[in-house]
Image (cartoon, helix red, strand yellow):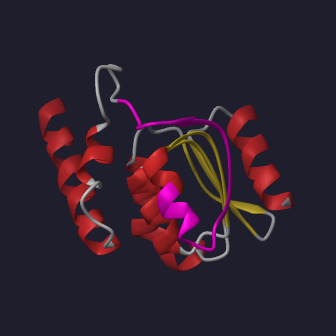
Amino acid sequence: MKELDFAKDVLEKEAYTLVIVKEGKVIFSSKDKGIKPMYTAVYSIKEKLEGASVADRIIGRAAAILCKYAKIKALYTKVISDSAVSVLKNSDILFRYEEKSLYIKNRDQTGICPVEQLSQDIDNPIILIDRIKSFLEDRKKENI
């Protein structure tokens, strides 16, 4: 998995939170936190993601559903949730991780990540994308 190793190296060396590689080139990268980078990639360049390799710092259930929807070929992550593993096991995605967690924690480390929570009761990526969009819009309003 040459491309996956390349994506992982770029992720670590450049301190990105998400790196997507296809045909030997970085086609998307971000230093944003949370679900925003994966959501942005799927929302803006989904048609280019099929067969790509992804390196991400943290993969929860929502991100795993988005990867499956985008037909990602391979995935590396530092931390993955149990529910993300379940999603990925029911896909064609080859995945590697360093640490598995019962769930992804929120930024305060006091409970479950809100995006992990909002994805628990669904498998439909279109509904999930709408929920993430609303979540990100609400977050943006709170920070204004």
Q: In this view, does 111 lie to the left or right of 51?
A: left
Residue 28 place in picture, x, y as percent:
59, 57
The residue at the far right in this view is 2
Residue 144 visible here? no
Horizontal relation, residue 12 to residue 129: left or right: right
Q: Is residue 79 above or below residue 118?
A: above
Tell whether position 104 is magenta. yes
Q: Taking 8 as reference, is 122 above or below it?
A: below
Q: In the rendered view, would you say 123 is above or below 133? A: below
Determine if residue 113 is in view.
Answer: yes
Residue closer to the observer: 98 or 128? 98
Image quadrant occupied by the N terminus: bottom right
Which of the 4 image quarters holds residue 99? top right
Residue at 29%, 74% in the rendered image: 126
Q: Seen in the image, is 42 located left or right of residue 123?
A: right
The percent coordinates of residue 44 (x first, y second) are: 43, 68
Please check the rendered image and state whether residue 27 is part of the magenta-colored stretch, yes or no. Answer: no
In the image: residue 119, left or right of residue 60: left
The residue drawn where x is 78% and y is 71% is 23
Residue 138, percent from left and from top: 14, 44
- Which residue corresponds to the image point at 48% horizontal and 53% vertical from the top-left? 84
Q: Residue at x 56, y 72 (%)?
A: 91
Q: Nearer the viewer, residue 77 or 143?
A: 77
- Quadrant of the image occupied by residue 131: bottom left
Q: Which range is magenta?
A: 86-105
Q: In which quarter of the image is the C terminus?
A: top left
Q: Position of residue 129 (x, y in %)?
A: 29, 65
